[in-house]
Amino acid sequence: MILKNIKIENFRNYESLELFFDNKLNILYGNNAQGKTNILESIYVLGLTKSHRSFIDNNLIKNGFNNAKIKGNILDNNIKSTMEINIEKKNKHFKIDNNDIKKTSDYISKLNIIIFYPEDLELIKGSPGVRRKYFNLELSQLYPKYFKVLNDYKKILKIRNDYLKQMQKGIEVDQTYFDILTEYLIENAIFIYKARNKFILRINEYFGKIYKRISGTEGLIIKYSPYFNLENFETEYLKKTLKEKVIKMHSTEIKLGVTLIGPHRDDFLFYLKENNIKEFGSQGQQRLAIISLKLAEVDVFRKYNNKIPILLLDDVFSELDDNKKNKLLKYISKNTQTFITTTDLKNIDPKTLTQAKIFKIKEGKVIKTKEVENNE
Ligand SMILES: Nc1ncnc2c1ncn2[C@@H]1O[C@H](COP(=O)(O)OP(=O)(O)OP(=O)(O)O)[C@@H](O)[C@H]1O
Ligand SMILES: [Mg+2]
């Protein structure tokens, strides 16, 4: 998958900009606060409709304007398409090849994006909710059905929790309807458990190997950890176990007024050999683990979904020593289109620079673009 070009209007600190990208490596460089991340963000929003760093869409619109537009041309297995997003203060519209797309799920599976950005460290340091949200987004990109099932699950969960809150207060509820809700909840829960488990198994095929290639250390894995122990992820076993848990937890659920069973309580743990790197890992190990996760995802997308995502790496260099930096650059697969931001080009291998398209960003403008650059 290749993003050929992008056209931005009134997005963040850009008024109007069009960039034509290299099929392989694109480097955006410039001082702080000039607009490097904003360009990566515009690519991310184009593909996924939401920002990776802001919940509030209005922040994306350039101050003083009413709407922002992002348009990009994509080449996927030699098939061209145009994606377009228009962000208004209270609304968003999407188009593919000039046709309005009403369902987000039909839109977000079109351009696959893997991003690394500094705040991603929260994936290790943060709460389980951060990790669930992350893996939900990745799975939604791969499977529109996952996105749909997850949304249904969230709706059912909310209604079921409302029922439990009423029961907690001693208010009588429609028991038949509550049982139907529980049944739907379990049905959707099984799908989510299975999808998450499969995805993590696939990530682990690559994750540890990539980490070893860059750091020299073996034994990095992700452990998928549902809130209570599950022996396997076979449908029948899950159904039976969840039904038993529902009965067993019924009085506690009423006492607390919340649903206690289901994948909304899952976690994903990063282990280096026998140690959870949240507690034992150094800062550098944690960072490299996250980068390895992103690179593993590129391989999973490619192998299992026949999709080659584009890779956005924000400020990835400032966090690695030169040795790891160059090993990382070497690892980045030759057929993955990559976009990297950096404040300077000094420590980048000159050979890599000659193979990259380089954009110099200053105050919301691209002031210099070179196909081939030896040094700055
Ligand atoms: N809605 C907006 N309207 C106008 N300017 C904005 C808006 N949102 C952000 N900016 C400006 O964009 C700039 C930040 O851009 P960006 O985050 O891309 O910087 P950067 O080049 O990645 O810097 P760093 O190297 O520090 O990461 C800031 O100057 C900020 O004021
Ligand atoms: Mg930045």
Image (tube, helix red, strand yellow):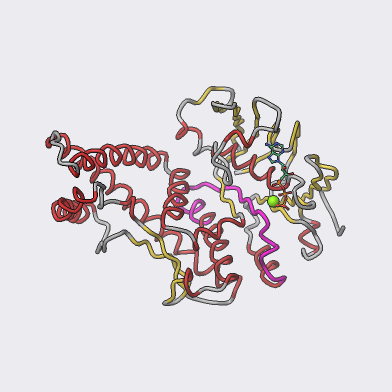
Magenta region includes residue 309: yes
Residue at point 79%, 62% (across, down): 351
Image side of residue 202 versus residue 252, left or right: right
Which range is magenta?
Answer: 299-322
Where residue 51 sits, quadrant-wise, is top right
Residue nearer the viewer, 154 or 59: 59
Residue nearer the viewer, 170 or 221: 170
Picture coordinates of residue 312 (x, y %)? 63, 50
Looking at the picture, does residue 179 appear above or below residue 317?
A: above
Residue at point 69%, 71% (across, down): 321
Residue furthest toward the front?
A: 169
Picture coordinates of residue 54 (x, y %)? 57, 43
Image side of residue 101 versus residue 374, left or right: left
Image quarter in which the N terminus is found: top right
Magenta region includes residue 126: no
Observer able to see residue 298: yes
Image side of residue 153 versus residue 43, left or right: left
Residue at point 46%, 53% (across, down): 130
Q: How many marks are shown on the rendered structure? A: 0
Observer able to see residue 71: no
Picture coordinates of residue 183 (x, y %)? 19, 42
Residue nearer the viewer, 145 or 253: 253
Looking at the picture, does residue 12 appear above or below residue 329?
A: above
Residue furthest toward the top?
A: 99
Residue at point 39%, 65% (across, down): 223
Image quarter in which the C terminus is found: bottom right
Residue nearer the viewer, 320 or 278: 278
Where residue 11 sits, quadrant-wise, is top right
